[in-house]
Each structure stands twice: as structure tokens, then as C-alpha cells.
Amino acid sequence: MYLVERRTSPAPADADPGATPARRRWAAVPATVLALGAVSLITDVSSEMVTAVLPLYLVAGLGVSPLGFGLLDGIYNGFSSLVGLVGGHLADRRGGRHKAVAAAGYGLSALCKPFLLLAHSVGPIGALLAVDRTGKGLRTAPRDALISLSTEPERRGRAFGVHRAMDTAGALMGPLVAFGLLRLAQGSLLADGGERSGYDSVFAVSGCVAAIGVLVLLLFVPNSSTTTQPEQSAEDAPAAERPRLRASFALLHRPALLRLTLCAVLLGLTTVSDSFLYLLLQRQLKLPVYLFPLLPIGTAAGFLLLAVPLGVLADRVGRRRLFLAGHLALLLAYGVLLNSSAQWAVFLVLALHGSFYAATDGVLAAAAADAVPAEHRGAGLALVNTGQTAARFVCSLAFGAAWTVWGPHTALAAATGGLALCAALAALTLRSRPPHPSSDEAPA
């Protein structure tokens, strides 16, 4: 605990001339980022255990149609947009309450996991997913604000890359745990609903792991008041005007943030959810159902390997540019899935999918942090995240409807064409920069 409190301000990379390059790279990452990465790692083990089995459980176990699954998947991935702005706003109040709001979000998600054991129909499951995503919406912007406020602006890409890599390590372990539990109760995977023992064990273990993540957050992550940024000092915070929710929307008057939000919305409207992508792979290759939880591992492995290198690259070549390049990788993944049914295609699709996340997830947060001042950091990050998650909610509904009406291949072809068009529009939107960029905006 003492070490975390002492090392929240970033140490210069050249502080130890005798340090190896690897040691200097880690020295550039504040301890707050590492502590939050540990929390995200543990929480993602819990979340991805559920995410890995949920599509199969709903479609094969409960017989949910693609349209119904699209609605539930939209809730799971987009409901957080309804509370994301509130989470960011609350975190910015009174000089920064980022840790408290993040803890409330993590706690809410952990609390709903055990109740999945009692949910045997689509309605209760949808309600629990909404509660879980409410927790995610509350915690995302405060967590990312803590990362950006504890890191020097020129190293934010690296810091977010390290955090996302640790987060993805949890995403890599979660499906493996779910796979092991399902293998121990393979009889629960009968298409007619069968016994629930395998799924129940996944839900129970997920709840226990999520509780550990909340405990680590409370014990080892410092309050935002202990972070150090030249943009804002703790002693000046009480005298500053308390952020208001209306002022959060006024941040869109900042040209850089407005363009970034518009691009996140445009591209989110044509980003097919992970669950649909894995269902397409499983059906096209006719994989055994017990192998389904292993598909997210391919994405997570690519994300894990590339998150830090691409975060460092974003600091050098421009975060907006790399964000667009990530969507080109996703476009290639859709193209491969449309045109190949060979076994090797699954590896290429998952590798491209992981590259997409490595080039966009933390990079988008770092770019958004560049575009807003420290006292509105939580709200600014929430605006971009809200726009993106709301757009992906719409995409899940539209893709589920298109799958039901036209079939999966035609639905994916439409999404591919839409993504190509939106990527071109986003490139035009981000092409120009504001005539007088703010002092806190890093080069793009």
C-alpha cells in the first residue's frame, strides 16, 4: 500500500542510467496504472467467464432467436451508455472522486453475478445484464481518468496499453476457466436445455472472482487526489467550480473532442459485437459446442501481445491515426470471414480481431484524454465512451434483425460495406485539426 501511494506520479524513464530498456519501460508506467491493471485483470477473468458461455447458453440452451440475442447482446454491450455520463460527471465533482465511483461500479457488477444462478429465463437474465452493464458504465470513465491523471501526457498511449494488456490477460484466462468448468460438466451442454450444472458453476465462480477484484481496488488503488499531474493540483481543486452535468455536454464544443466522438459513433455503428462474431465462426466451421468458450482466447491473445507495442506506437505516430488503422484490421477480419470457410481462417480472423482491439481500445481513451482538461477528464472520457457504446448497441440490434431476415452471411456483408464507408468518413473527419489546439492536446 505504501509503495502504491508513493509511486503514483510517473518516474522519468531516464531516472536510472544503468537500467535496462525493459526496466525503463516499466518505470514509465505509474503504480496507479499497474494497480488498476490488476483490478481489471481479476474483474475480466470474472466477466469473460460469463461472456464466453452466454451466447451458447442463450441460443443453444434457451433457444433464443438471433433477433432476441441481438437485443440481449445490445443490452450487455450498450446499456452502460445510459449511465456512463453520470459516472464521469460524479467522478469529477469535488476535486475528483474517481476511485469511489469506480468502486461503486465494480461492486455493482460483482453483486449481480451470483444472481445468474437463479435466472432461468430471458427476462431475468436481461435484467441482470442491464445491472452488470450499469456497473461497467459507472466505472469505465473514472478508471480511465485515474490512468490519464497519473500519467504524463506524452506517455498515455503506453500507460493505456499496459493497462489494457493486463485487462486482456484476464480476458484470456476467463474463457479458459469457463472451458475447464464446462468440460467437468459436459452433460449440461445439451441443445435441449439439459442440466445447468456446467453453467451454474461458471456463474458461481465468476461471482467469487469479481468480489476479489473489488477488494483489490479498495486496498491498493489510491484516491484520485493522490495522483500528480501538472494540469491540476489538489490544493487548487476545492476552489475550482464544481463540474455540472450540463458542462459535460458543453465539452463537445471542443473541436478535437467533438470529432473524436463523431468518429467513435460512426465506427461503432458498424462494429459487429464479439458474441455475434464468435457465433458466426462456430457455425461456419461447425465447431463442437464445448470449444466455443475458447474462441475469445484468440482475440485476447492478439490483444495481449499487441496492446503495449501499439500503445507506444500511438504515442509516436498519432493516436487518431492508429485508431483508424485498427478498424482497417477489423475490416480485413470481416472480409476473411465472408470469403473463407477453411479451418485456418479462424486463426486469422481472431488475430485480426485482437489487433483491432489493441489499436483502438486504450488508444481511443488516450486520444480523448488529450482533448479535455484535467478537471473534466472523467466527463470527457465518458462522452466518447458513451457515443461508442450507444452506437454498438444499435449495431447489435440491427445485426440481429438482419441475421433473422437475411441470414448471417448477408448481414455480415452489409456490416462490412458499412464499416468501409464509415472508416472513410471518419478519416475525413479526423483529417483536419482545430486551428488553436488546447495546451493539453497531444499531437495526433
Image (cartoon, helix red, strand yellow):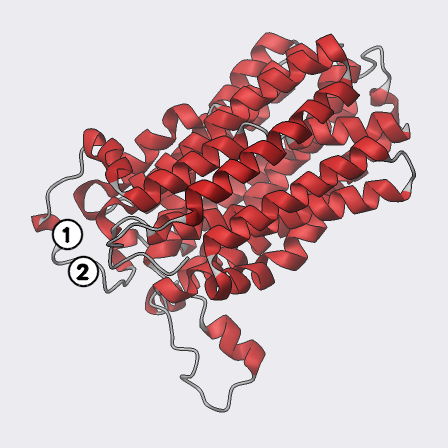
**Quadrant of residue 28 in the image?**
bottom left
Amino acid identity at mark 1? Ala
* Residue tagged 2: 233
Viewer-side residue, 243 vs 431: 431
Viewer-side residue, 251 vs 74: 251
Q: Which mark is residue 5?
A: none
Work out how far the residue at label 2 is from the one at label 1, CA to CA, in angstroms.
7 Å
* Residue tagged 1: 237
Viewer-side residue, 18 vs 78: 78
From the viewer's perspective, tell me whether residue 39 is left or right of residue 273. Answer: left
Residue 410 visible in the picture: yes
| In the image, residue 376 above or below residue 412 | below
Amino acid identity at mark 2? Ser
Q: Position of residue 243 (x, y in %)?
A: 18, 38
Viewer-side residue, 96 vs 217: 96
Residue at x-position 57% and y-position 54%: 166
From the viewer's perspective, tell me whether residue 130 is left or right of residue 291. Answer: left
| In the image, residue 185 above or below residue 27 | above
Q: Are marks 2 and 1 in contact (CB under 8 Å)?
A: yes
Residue at x-position 91% and y-position 40%: 343
Q: What is the secondary structure assignment of the residue under circle 2?
A: loop
Residue 102 visible in the picture: no
Q: What is the secondary structure assignment of the residue under circle 1?
A: helix
Q: Position of residue 29 (x, y in %)?
A: 45, 67
Give neighbour class at mark 1: few <14, some 14-19, many 20+ (Cα, 10 Å). Answer: some
Q: Position of residue 393 (x, y in %)?
A: 53, 23
Q: Position of residue 444 (x, y in %)?
A: 42, 57
Give neighbour class at mark 2: few <14, some 14-19, many 20+ (Cα, 10 Å). Answer: some
